[in-house]
Structure formats: structure tokens, C-alpha cells
Image (spheres, rainbow, N blue to C red):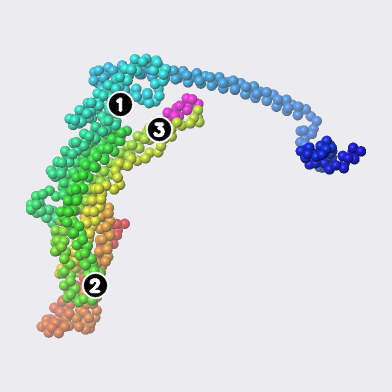
Amino acid sequence: MTADLMDDVEPPKTMVAALGTDSPARALRALSRASEVKAERLANELNQQLSSFLIELPDIISKDTKEISTSIACVDSILESLTKIATGGTQASQEIRILEEEKRRLEQQSQDVETALSLRRNSEGAAEALSSQKYDIAAKAVQEYTVQERMDRLTPRALAYAGEYTVQQMETTKEVLRNTLLQRYKDAVGSSNLQMLGDLTPLLSMIDMEKEGAELYVEYLKKILLEELDEAKLGSKEERPSDMPQSRASMRREKERRKKDPQTPPYVQMACIYNTAVTALRHHLPMVSHFLHKADGDSAVVQLVNNEVEQIIVPLFQFYIQDRQLAVVARNSQRIYSSLEERYVGRLNSLVSTEESLANDMDDCGFSMEVGSLADVDGALDEAALCLQHTESYQRFLHHTINEVNKARQMRHDKEAEIKRLERERAEWATGMSQAPIAEQEAAFAPLQILSTNTPLMEVVAELGGYYSGIERCLLLASMQRAFSTRTNFIEMPQDHTLKTSLVDTCLFATRRSAKRAFATGHRGTASAMTNFCGDTLGGVLLEVMTRRAQDSGVAKLKPGDGLLEGGLSLFSAPHTLMKSQSEDEATRQRKMQQGIARACATLNDLDVASHHVAELEKMLT
């Protein structure tokens, strides 16, 4: 009866569900019966699958031999040997670690003893040297003490070995030495004793007083620099040689100007001021950069010199621009240049007659009245170019000095990084910690920004360069206008005895002089602007004028019937010419005709000469 009930009851899925039924005992028995049936079924299925699965064993296992027993015995022997080795290695490593700890303890103790002996020796030596005023020996002893303190070698045990009296004596000597050297340094600054400053500056660096030394040295340098700059403003010092290309005419005009106006030219004053600044940097910067770089004494010296120079040079430039009225002259030059360019490049020029064209060529559009004569403007531009040249040379020297300061700083940074790396590797090797963490990561070197990228001196130089470029451009075109308006001179070329005019040589001479003067300034903006102006003037104005002259005076006269050749009216076939030619013989007529043809061809030869010069210029630039 019970079995039937068990079969009739549906077994629950889980034991938790069985406990929730009305008869938990009956439900659990039903669940047990269902699990037993399922297990028997799965076991039968597994036996059927295994009966069809065959494994082929190796011969060495399937054969009934003694080799398997031997192999197992060998393996057990090897395992036992390895176990003994591992146990012995563990014991050995423990002993090695104990020995390493003992070694490190003895090394630390030995180092503490060495530090204590060095501290006692330095303490006695520093006190004795200070009492006998041998400051260099005392500073060296204090420096060694400071290095030991910085390297954490003054451990409590080392200080105990050295003794409390030794430490107190060293600290007292250090403080007295710092106060003594600082007072002597102040006295040297007050009396401007450069020799004493040269002796004391290295000592201040040895006892970590770079900051005080840099401040006092900058104070001393400022005092003597102002005195030298006041003397240089008078222009009494000799001006350095200039790279400016100067012709004999410009040198003669300069001598005449100095006779009429004995006042010192502005570029002479600027050169004297710049020379004074350069001399100060060359004389004082090396020592400051070597001994006071930790307190940024090198950058302070460069900033001081540049600031004092700018305070003098910038007003001098402003007065020069105002005195020469460069703003007004540059504005007039721009207007005159536009008028001249329109005359030779504009379309209206092709509609005027030859007589009107010659009359227009004689008119310089007010250049002589509003700007000045060609000679005066050329001399004024020489003066402006020299001012720009001296300033650019000074700024290049200043940038070179800043680069050298940063190079020295980078070399010291790399050296310190290498020393720290070697110390870290030595410590890792001594402690056996190959993966020891680095206490501090070395930062990459960053160059010091000593001066601003845009200074007042750069701004006023850019202003003067703009005025100079505008006036120089107008002078170039005015010089070409003078060549266009003058009487044509024919020159015989030595290669083939053909004729050419002086137009190309005159215009290219003016262009070459303007370009050389612009390049001699050394100012990149000015030189670039004038290079573009020269190219535009040659390609726009000179080429246009030469093409028009070749058309009017060359091609037109060589056309049969229209010019010098027979076949129509020409220079020799006009009525008055025919009447005159009756009294002339045929040889004279042929000679004049050949001369006229040669002069007509000269305008065409000018194009070939200009092409040759352009090719030479292109070869030089590329």
C-alpha cells in the first residue's frame, strides 16, 4: 500500500519544494526514488559508451617486464635528491641572507666611523683655518660637512662617534664663516673691488650662499655698468668696424656732414653702448654662471645688462625717428612710389606720345621736394642701416649668450643625473634589490626663458625697419626714374663689338646697392621686404620700360618702310632729310644708316644683357 502511494505521488523537483508539501516525508521518499532511477539510467548509458571506447597503450606499458619498476625507482631516487637539494638551498639562502645583513651592518658601521673621523678632521681644520683667516680651507671643510649632511651620512651613530663637541664646533665655525664672508663680500661690492669679488665668489658657492652672492654681485654690476653706459652715451669710445658697404661718395658725404654738424651720429652712440654691454657680459658672465648658477645668477646678469641697454637705446631710437621725421618721409615715399609705379606700369602710359613720355620721365613726382635728393636720401639710409646693423649684431650676440647659458645648465643637469644613476645602481647592487623603487624621478631638462620674446627694443627696431624699407623702395624707383629720364649713352660690348645702353647697368647698380644695404642690416624682416621690393621693381617696372623702349626705339625703326630700312618713310627719307642727303655722298649715308641700325638694336641687346644678369643672380641665390 505504501509502495503504491509512493509511485502515485509526483516527486518534487527540489528538497525545498518537498518541505513545502502537505506530507514532506512522502515527498522526500518520492524524490529519493526518482533520483535513484535517474542514476541507474545514467550509469547504464555510461557503460554502453565506455564499452565502445578502446585505448591502445604503449608497448613499454602493455608488456609484462621489469622496466617499469626500474623507471619508477629511478624517478623516486631523483625526486629524493632534488628534495634534499632544495632543502639545502633553502638553508644556504637563509645563511646567505644572514651574511648579507651582517655585511650591510658592518659596512654601515664602517661608513659611520669614516664619517665621524672626517667630521672631526674637518671641524678641527675649519676652526683653525678660520682663526688664521684662511677662508678657502675653512670653506672647503664646511663644504665637505654640507655634502655629508646632504647625503644623509650624519647618522645618530656617526654623530655619537664624532662627539657632541665636534658637531657644535663645526656648526659654530660654519655660521661664523658665512657671516664673515658675507660681510667681506658686501665690503667688496661697496668699494667695487673686483679682485676681492673674484676671490670670494667661489667661496660663497662652496658654503651654499649662492643666493646672497648673486644679489650682491648683480648690485655691483649694475653700479659699474651704469657708469660705463653714461660714458658710452657720449660716443667717446671708438666705434667698431662696420660691414655696411660704403662707397667713396657716401664716405665723402659723411666727412662733409661731420664738418657741418659735429654732433655724434646716433649709430656711433649705439655702437658704443652695445660694445659696453657685450664687454660686461663677456667679462662677468663666465664666473657668475660657473659659481652662482644655482641662484640663477647667470640669468640675472643677462637680464640686468639687457634692461639697462634698452632703457638707453629705446629713447635714442625714438628720438632718432622723430628727429629725422621718418614717419612723414615714409608716408611721402609711399605716395611717390605709387605715382611712379603707375606711370611706368599703368595703361595710360601707352596712350601718350613720345614727347609727353619724355616730359613725364623728367618729373620725379615730388621726390626731390618732399623726400630729398638722391644723394641725401642715400646717406640717410646708410645712417638708418647702420643703426639697424648694430642693434641686430647686439641681439644676435645676446641670443648666442643665452644659448650658451642653457647649454652649460644642460651639461650640469646631465652630469648630476649620471651621478645619481650611478649611486642608485651601486646601492641596488649592495643591497641586492634589483627592483628597488626609485625615490625621485629625474625630470627632463627645460631651457631657461631668460628674456621675453617681444622686448621694447625689438618693437622700435621693427618700426624703424618698416620706415627704412618704404624709403629704400622709393629711392630705388627714383634712381631708376633718373636713369629713364637721362640721355641714352651707348656702350660697345667687347665680346662682339655690338652696342648696348647704360640703362640696364644703371638700374641694376641701384638695385644691387639697395639689396646689399638691406642685407647688411642683418634684420631679417627688412632684408626680406627689400628682396621682394627689388624683385617687384625689376620685374614690374624695369621689364615694362625695357619692353616699351625696345618696341618704340628698336623694333619699330627696324621695320621695312617704317624705320631705318628702305621701303618707305624713315629717318633718312623725310623731306628735309632727302634735301640734305643730296649733298652727301653715298658712304656717309651708309655710315649713318649703319649707326642708326646699331643704336636701334642696342635696345634689343639690353634685354639680352638683363637676361644674363638675372641668370647670374638666380645662380647666386640657388
- Is the stretch drawn in magenta largely helix, strand or loop? helix
**Which of the 4 image quadrants contains residue 354?**
bottom left
Image: 141 above or below 362: above
Q: CA distance from mark 3 to mark 1?
A: 24 Å
Which amino acid is tagged 3? Glu
**Residue 422 magenta-highlighted:** yes
Nearer-N-terminus badge (3/1): 1
Which amino acid is tagged 1? Ile
Which amino acid is tagged 2? Arg
Start and end of the magenta stretch? 420-432
The residue under label 2 is 548
Q: Is residue 21 left or right of residue 530?
A: right
Q: CA distance from mark 2 to mark 1?
A: 82 Å
The spot of residue 491 in percent (x, y) is: 17, 67
On the rendered image, what quadrant is the N terminus found in? top right
Q: Residue lying furthest left in this view?
A: 259
Nearer-N-terminus badge (2/1): 1
The residue under label 3 is 418
Q: Nearer the viewer, mark 2 or mark 3?
A: 3
The residue under label 1 is 207
On the rendered image, what quadrant is the C terminus found in? bottom left
Which residue does the image show at 19% across and 38% down from the upper left? 225
The spot of residue 125 in percent (x, y) is: 30, 18
Nearer-N-terminus badge (2/3): 3
Which residue does the image show at 23% across and 66% down from the upper left? 338
Q: CA distance from mark 2 to mark 3?
A: 74 Å
Q: Is residue 248 visible?
A: no
Residue toward you, 606 or 264: 264
Q: Secondary structure at mark 3?
A: helix
